[in-house]
Amino acid sequence: MLWRLHTGAPWRDLPERYGPWQTVYERFARWEAEGTWAKLLEYVQVRDDAVGQVEWTVAVDSTINRARQHAAGARKKGRPAGTNWRIRNARRRGRPSAGPGAG
């Protein structure tokens, strides 16, 4: 199982010395469903962190955070973009009030 994860090769390319690929895959899938892989990872992280061998660095690759092309023209919430809203608001503020106490 670790050979496959290390190489990224398809399950069908698993070397024969590990047995039938279907058997190895079924075991892998069962361990994943049971949480065995998560427990192993947690054990290794806790053990190695206790002796200072884990560097907790996180990196995010921006190439995977792209919006679809259709999102480029979507309307934005909040204030409208551009300067037209400023002009409209300035005109509204400049008009005399027709309420009580008006001129």
Image: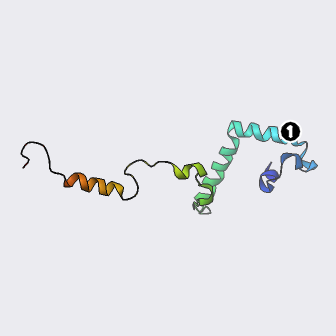
Q: In the picture shown, does residue 33 fall above or below 58?
A: above
Give percent across and percent down for residue 98: 13, 44
Foreground: 13 or 74?
74
Q: Residues within 10 Å of mark 1 (few under 14, many from 20)?
A: few
Residue type for callout 1? Thr
User: Which sits in the foreground, 4 or 74?
Assistant: 74
Disc 1 is placed on an element classified as helix
The residue drawn where x is 69% and y is 36% is 34
Q: Residue, x 8% and y 47% (percent of image)?
A: 102
Please report the residue visible at 63 percent of the width from the left and 49 percent of the height from the top. Answer: 42
Residue 59 horizontal/vertical position (percent): 58, 61
Left or right of 71, for residue 86: left
Circle 1 residue: 23
Residue 34, above or below 87: above
Colour convention of the picture: rainbow
Q: Quadrant of residue 53?
A: bottom right
* Residue closer to the observer: 49 or 4: 4
On the question of residue 61 being in view, the answer is no
Q: What x and y, as percent, mark residue 40?
A: 68, 47
